[in-house]
Amino acid sequence: MATGPDRTQDVRVQRAVGTLLRVGVLLAALVVLAGAVLYLVRHGGDVPDYRVFRGEPLDLRGYGAIVRDAFSGSGRGIVQLGLLILVATPVARVAFTAVAFAVERDRTYVLIALLVLALLLKSLAG
Amino acid sequence: MNTLAFSATIAAAAFCAGFLGSLTGLGGGFIVTPVLTILFGADIRYAIGASLIAIIATSSGAAAAYVREGFTNLRVGMLLEVATVTGAVIGASLVAVFPARLLTVVFGLVLLVSAYLTTRPRAEHLTADAPPDRLASRLRLDSEYPTPAGPQRYRTRRVPGAFALMWVAGVLSGLLGIGSGAVKVLAMDQVMYLPFKVSTATSNFMIGVTAAASAGIYLRHGYVDPGLAMPVMLGVLAGSTVGARLLFGTPTRRLRLLFAAVIVTIGLDMIYHGAFGGR
């Protein structure tokens, strides 16, 4: 049972992880919003069609390509960059939890968090 | 319908998804996928890509509040995450092999089973008076959570069973592009006997991590379309932020029933369209 000093440490970890999430989410939302405005100004009148699956073009698939596309000013590229930041928030959350458990000297959970992080990064890197 | 109206409608639906998803721990994907395929006739693969984004947005949006307030059990979440991420990687690597219609039927069945299990009655939670579980104590999984009557301590049990169920949840999640929050909530709620709000908040924390594990794979397959994902992400974030504020004061029984009704409806529809084609 987590009581006494244990519990206060847990609360500190909770605050820090909560703040990290808020910042990541806000940043992602702002980038997506900026891209959305550009995209809607340019293509708001088009008729969208997602009935047939074509797959995204290659410049919206790879991490490097998305960043290049975003910085070239493409609305869709900027949205995709914001989505990448969003996808990165859970990764950052796991990494940060590992650090927090290390500060608490909870070795079991440092290992668990690092294991999750390794699996996550391997899957994201493909 | 032009892109502006299309985006606005999807954003409104996504708001509801984020709202319900954050309160129930089911993730917004459960609503976003059927809305895109049934109402807008989108290909299931585009819908899956957008729903993954919805899940991550619900998770990160609500987790910011839940973790701070102490609803989320970080140790339970991280431990079970090992099982779900391993499962998700395997599930997602099978996705290119599976036909879209079979996927739809499986998805519908998952919804029906989830609805049945979430409404079964159960005891609220194990108090600190209950005998401690050896494995749960060693892993320091017992904790406390806020209630209107002040902080309430609770105990945790049957860790291996929950771990196994979580692995299955992970495979489903990778295969279907859903957070499979329903299975996660069940593992914690029914198997580990965590308080319902702890189960939903911890599930909410976990589904984002699991979904992120499959997001990379779906992105490379070209499933994530910015035009679809953009209104979904913004709507869900707004909805989950509002939902997260209401968790503390909401009676859980009412939420379970409401959501069970919603997922039964959607599940039946998905099975029908997956099995008989249509549209």
Image: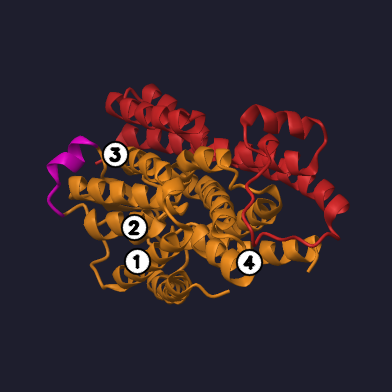
Chain colours: A red, B orange
Rendered location of residue A115, percent (x, y):
35, 28
Between discs 4 and 1, the one toward the N terminus: 4
Q: Secondary structure at mark 1?
A: helix
Question: Looking at the picture, does residue B251 appear above or below residue B248?
Answer: below
From the image, state whether disc 2 or disc 3 is nearer to you.
2
Q: Are marks 2 and 4 in contact (CB under 8 Å)?
A: no
Between discs 1 and 2, the one toward the N terminus: 1
- The residue wearing badge 3 is A3
* Dot 4: chain letter: B
Q: Residue at x 71, y 61 (%)?
A: A49
Residue range in magenta is B130-139
The amino acid at mark 1 is: Ser
* Dot 1: chain letter: B
The amino acid at mark 2 is: Val
Give me the disc on residue A31.
none
Circles 2 and 4 on the same chain:
yes
